[in-house]
């Protein structure tokens, strides 16, 4: 089940990243907050806690109209998101979205260390 969750997380990133970037460019903070909220939740579910925490701050900032926080944390959040996706892709290899590794009992932490 965890492996399938990782598959979904990666596949959803293909639409989520462009949406986050679009809403940021358009200053559409309502939709930006909604997409970042979803990222917060799914990141927490897979164990990407640093990313989940940044997304939570950005969600709160979007709700409050705190542009300073949004402008300072948007790029670091996207960079970390892309690193997490890259780590999952590296782990999954050819099994991505096939579900062949599901149920093997392996649970891994995919959040890169802060100094990477």
Image (tube, rainbow, N blue to C red):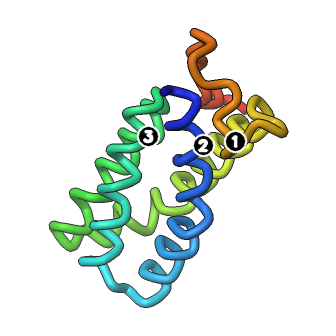
Q: In percent of the image, x 35 and y 61: which residue is there?
A: 69
Which residue in the structure is indicated by mark 3? 43
Label 1 element class: loop
Crowdedness near tag 2: few (<14), some (14–19) or many (≥20) residues, C-alpha within 10 Å: many
Label 3 element class: helix
Q: In percent of the image, x 50 and y 37: which residue is there?
A: 5
**On residue 7, which mark appears?**
2
Q: Nearer the viewer, residue 108 or 5?
A: 5
> Dividing the picture into quarters, in which one does residue 35 lie?
bottom left
Position of residue 70 measured from the top left corner of the image (x, y, whole percent): 38, 65
Crowdedness near tag 3: few (<14), some (14–19) or many (≥20) residues, C-alpha within 10 Å: many
Q: Nearer the viewer, residue 98 or 57?
A: 98
Is the Cβ of the residue at disc 1 closer than 8 Å to that at disc 2? yes
Q: Is residue 112 above or below residue 15?
A: above
Q: Please identify the residue farthest to the left as the structure is shown.
A: 64
Look at discs 2 and 3 and give the one toward the viewer: 2
Position of residue 58 measured from the top left corner of the image (x, y, whole percent): 33, 57
Position of residue 72 measured from the top left corner of the image (x, y, whole percent): 46, 61
Q: Is residue 82 above or below residue 84?
A: below
Alpha carbon of mark 2 to alpha carbon of mark 3: how far?
13 Å
Alpha carbon of mark 1 to alpha carbon of mark 2: how far?
8 Å
> Dividing the picture into quarters, in which one does residue 104 lie?
top right
Which comes sooner in the sequence, label 1 or label 3?
3
Q: In percent of the image, x 36 and y 60: which residue is there?
A: 36
Which comes sooner in the sequence, label 1 or label 2?
2
Label 2 element class: helix
Look at discs 1 and 3 and give the one toward the viewer: 1
Which residue in the structure is indicated by mark 1? 98
Q: Please identify the residue farthest to the top as the structure is shown.
A: 105
Which comes sooner in the sequence, label 2 or label 3?
2
Alpha carbon of mark 1 to alpha carbon of mark 3: how far?
21 Å
Is the Cβ of the residue at disc 2 closer than 8 Å to that at disc 3? no
């Amino acid at each position: 089940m965890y492996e399938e969750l990782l598959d979904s997380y990666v596949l959803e990133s293909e639409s989520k990243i462009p949406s986050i970037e679009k809403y940021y460019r358009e200053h559409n903070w309502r939709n930006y907050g909604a997409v970042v909220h979803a990222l917060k939740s799914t990141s927490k579910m897979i164990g990407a806690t640093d990313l989940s925490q940044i997304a939570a701050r950005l969600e709160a900032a979007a709700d409050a109209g705190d542009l300073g926080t949004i402008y300072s944390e948007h790029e670091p959040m996207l960079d970390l998101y892309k690193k997490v996706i890259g780590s999952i892709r590296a782990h999954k290899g050819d099994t991505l979205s096939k579900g062949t590794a599901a149920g093997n009992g392996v649970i891994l932490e995919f959040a890169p260390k802060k100094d990477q």
